[in-house]
Image (spheres, helix red, strand yellow):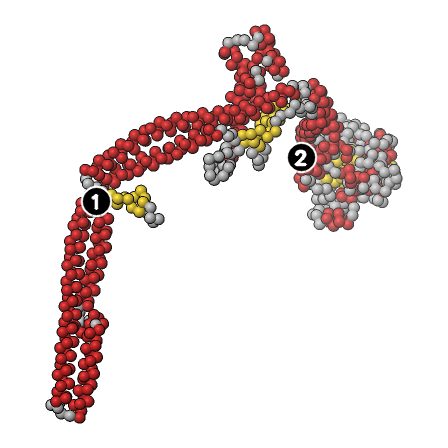
Amino acid sequence: MNDLTFNRVSDMPAGSVDTGAPAANSMPAIVRYLNILKRRKWLLVTAVAVAVIIGLLATLLMTSMYTAETTIEIKREDYQIVNVRGVEGENSPTDLEFYETQWGLLRAESLAERVATELHLQDSADFFEMFGKDKIASAIRSGGAEGGSAQRQKRIRDAAEILLKHVAISPTRGSRLAVISATTPDPKLSQKIADTWSQAFIQISLERRFEATSYARTFLEQRLQQLRQRLQESERALFAYAARQHIVNIPVASASGQEGNAERPIVAEDLSALNKELNEATASRIAAQSRLGGNGGATPEALSNQAISSLRAKRADLAADYARMTAQFDPGYPPAKALADQIATVDRSIANEEARVRNTLQAGYKAAAAREDQLRQHVNQLEGDLISLRGKTIQYNIFQREVDTNRQLYDALLQRYKEIGVAGGVGVNNISVVDRAEVPERPSSPRLLVNLLVSVLLGGLAGIGLAVVLEQLDQTISDPNALEAALGLPLLGIIPKSTEGDPIDTLEDPKTALVEAYLSTQTRLAFTTDHGIPRTLAITSTRPAEGKTTTAYAMARQLARGGNRVLLIDSDMRSPSLHGMLGINADRGLSNYLAGDDDWQAMVRPYVNNLSLLPAGPQPPNAAELLTGNRLGKLLADLLKNYDHIVIDAPPVMGLADTPLIGSHVEGVIFVTESHSTPTSMARVAISRLREAHSRVLGALLTKFSSDKSQSGYGYGYEYGYGYGREGGDSATGGNAAKG
């Protein structure tokens, strides 16, 4: 044991043992399954071999099939020759739905029936015989191709069903391409079916389009006739009403100066024109009135009058001369008086001129006011007429809207009717053949390599499933990792299966894997109590022949090699075997002492250095009765005074009461179980009986372990553990030894 193991075990409480192996549940599932396959490798190989043979025979017996393929392109819309937006239609969000519909149409039964009819497959006996329809083929040969329409139609449906089973539609992902594959035993027939299938699909598509266009054209013609009559009636009603109500409308010019479809009443036009003139007359009157607001000489016309301006300049000169003269002379001075008269004459001329200007302005104002009044009267009259007209226009507009609606419907249907006529005449299809089918030169099936690979895969899966099922049905302990979980006991050690001679002779060689396994178990056993290896130790098992006797001798022999005084007791008084293995006289032994003979010293037989044997003695009538008293406890107490360790080879637990009685007197019990053999349920019952008798079960020892049958990885430990350093590689165990 390495230092790490010692440190881990030393931290555990007394009476417990670290197995040094991971728990069963800690192993990854993939590792467990790989180990299962390793154990059941021959089962897996057999399953694969059987599957390969079956696949090979099936391939050889299968009929050769030939596959021909035709590639077609399906566009979302047909070419829009009359569409000004472009040559091809634009894609829409419904492309996926459209193409799924096309794939469904390619698999339609009606298409298959059309292909069968075009190739005359319903009258071909060879075709039906080719696909195992011998009854139909015989009927065709016996009765010829004639027959009633019902029988012929039934043969067409039968041929279509065969075609649908042997024709595959494979859309190319991310494109508008689809591959039509026809598979039959005849390569030429496969090529014909693939090509005919594509051509029939194109023809059906064109026919469907033509039928839809023809129906739409007929429907539109009927609707156009109805709308034409309705439009004429609505126009007549509109004209009659306008004549009765004297409603006269004139077209309204558009922004470009051209007349549009909109109309306005003539009264509104007149009112608009007169209202504009009224606004202008009002503005003129206000302007004339504003000019009359000031004095006669302060009006703009007076200020801008040249005569008044010259008179005012002349008066200014006279006033200046008069001022200079009066400064020197008296106002009565004749020249001064003459100047004053001239000034007065000029003032009268200015006043007369200003009066003339004022009279002119007043006349203009009166004329503007009169014109404004006349225009206002006309506007008021037209407003009344327009209000009266609006009441009549309500019904007029109703007639007008009906006319407009009927005209729009008629124009729209007429345009659509023309488009359908042009599109129907063009006749361009949205489906085209990209690659035509060729006659296949090689069969597409059966494919030997593929069938063999599938057979290997299926055989492997079957072998794996069978191996897992067998493992689930196996109730024995074959995995050391699962022992603790299955029995509830720590794993003390794993004893490899010995393949050489007598185990006693093998145990005498300290370098063998068997000795190393027991030495490892002894090392683990040293940590089960606070004082090391128990001084009194019983070895038992569920049933006979599990290796408990060999284990008892091996444990005693290892303890004796360590310099301890060891006594090995054969307590299996019903079927003793130790004395025979060791070649020792067993005329007296344990049964004699339990029956009342206290001279145990005379019963002990020395064997090798530090190791002695107390045989079972004569077979008593009832061994359990001898063990029920206190004689065994007294014997063990006396023996411990003379020996360091006492190892007891106890009988099996199942069916006997001996071992539970013995276990209650010893310090610990080692439970031996045979790998790949002992049922787990039986071992659990045996351990439960020991515990009910207050026996201290220290742990379990897995014996006769073979790594090539195990689903764990313990074989690695043996090869690089117990067998490490030995010449020749493996020991007498064949490379199988316990993991220390």
The residue at the point 61 percent across, 27 percent down is: 436
- Pick whichever, 392 or 175, lies toward us: 392
Please state the horizontal and vertical placement of residue 500, each as a whole percent of the image: 85, 32
Judge whether 278 appears above or below 624 on screen.
Answer: below
Give residue 688's mark: 2
Badge 1 is on which residue? 390
Please state the horizontal and vertical placement of residue 426, each as a whole percent of the image: 48, 30
Is residue 507 something one can see in this rendering? no
Horizontal arrangement in the rendering, residue 712 relative to residue 606 (left or right): left
Distance Cα–Cα, label 1 vs label 2: 113 Å
Looking at numbered disc 1 in the image, what kind of residue is underneath it? Arg
- Pick whichever, 220 or 345, lies toward us: 345
Give residue 718's mark: none
Q: Secondary structure at mark 1?
A: helix
Judge whether 18 appears above or below 589 on screen.
Answer: below
Horizontal arrangement in the rendering, residue 105 relative to residue 51 (left or right): left
Residue sitting at the far top: 142
Structural crowding at the residue carrying mark 1, measured as other residues with C-alpha within 10 Å and reported as few (<14), some (14–19) or many (≥20) = few
- Pick whichever, 233 or 125, lies toward us: 233
* Image quarter in which the C terminus is found: top right
Which image quadrant is residue 16 in?
top right
Structural crowding at the residue carrying mark 2, measured as other residues with C-alpha within 10 Å and reported as few (<14), some (14–19) or many (≥20) = some
Judge whether 369 appears above or below 423 on screen.
Answer: below
Judge whether 693 appears above or below 121 on screen.
Answer: below
Looking at numbered disc 2 in the image, what kind of residue is underneath it? Ser
Please state the horizontal and vertical placement of residue 451, each as a whole percent of the image: 69, 26
Please state the horizontal and vertical placement of residue 309, each as a whole percent of the image: 21, 76
Q: Earlier in the sequence, mark 1 or mark 2?
A: 1
Front disc: 1 or 2: 1
Is residue 528 something one can see in this rendering? yes
The residue at the point 18 percent across, 52 percent down is: 379
